[in-house]
Image (cartoon, helix red, strand yellow):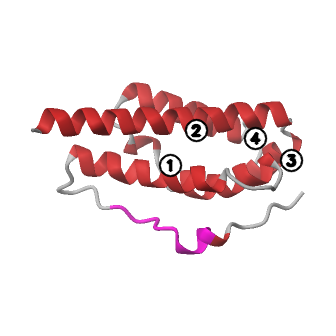
Amino acid sequence: MQYPASSVGRDIELTYQHSGESRMDHLAYIAGKFERAIKELVGPEPLQDRLAAANIWLHAIRLEDFRSTRLRGQYQNIRDRLAQPGHTYEDTLAVMTDEEAAEITSLIVDLYFEIEQERLSEAINSN
């Protein structure tokens, strides 16, 4: 099964400057990619297709971008579930059940909220 490329994927920003960044700026970068991914998860298309579109935004985030070991582990879990070992994302999504797709979608939304909570905590602690 071929998954259509997301229209917003054309303007994806794959570059990110790590030098001179504050922790809040770093979290803002990650949160921004998750926001775009979550927007892709809404619509009438099959959930697997929406996950493929969301993955375009998530793919821009590297594990090293997460400074928190806990958040990095949650992100790794999402990445692992989107692409089973030895398979592409497309192959994994093509055989993914609706239930598993819904579970992964929930993990993405939950992690986004945890990222935002950490951003809020950083903002409060910086004042």
Q: Earlier in the sequence, mark 2 or mark 3?
A: 3
Give the label, 2 or 3, closer to the camera.
Answer: 2
Mark seen at residue 108: 2
Please tell me whether residue 109 is drawn above or below residue 54 in the rendered image. above
Q: Earlier in the sequence, mark 2 or mark 1?
A: 1
What amino acid is labelled 4 in the image?
A: Gly
Residue 58, given in percent of the width and then of the height, sits at 55, 51
91 to the left or right of 124: right
Q: Residue at x 47, y 50 (%)?
A: 61
- The answer to whether residue 59 is seen in the rendering is no
Check residue 13 for magenta coloring: yes
31 to the left or right of 50: left
Please tell me whether residue 37 is drawn above or below residue 12 in the rendered image. above
Q: Earlier in the sequence, mark 1 or mark 4?
A: 1
90 to the left or right of 119: right
What amino acid is labelled 2 in the image?
A: Ile
Which segment did they paint magenta? Answer: 8-16
Residue 39, given in percent of the width and then of the height, sits at 59, 55
Mark 3–mark 1 Cα distance, whole angstroms, equals 22 Å
Mark seen at residue 94: 3
Mark seen at residue 34: 1
Q: Earlier in the sequence, mark 3 or mark 1?
A: 1
Closest to the observer: 124 or 59? Answer: 124
13 to the left or right of 26: right
Give the label, 3 or 1, closer to the camera.
Answer: 1
Check residue 49 for magenta coloring: no
Local SS, label 4: loop
Q: Earlier in the sequence, mark 4 or mark 2?
A: 4
Mark 2–mark 1 Cα distance, whole angstroms, equals 8 Å
Query: For mark 1, does the 10 Å Cα neighbourhood hold few (<14), some (14 to 19), or many (20 or more) residues?
Result: many
Closest to the observer: 22 or 113? Answer: 113
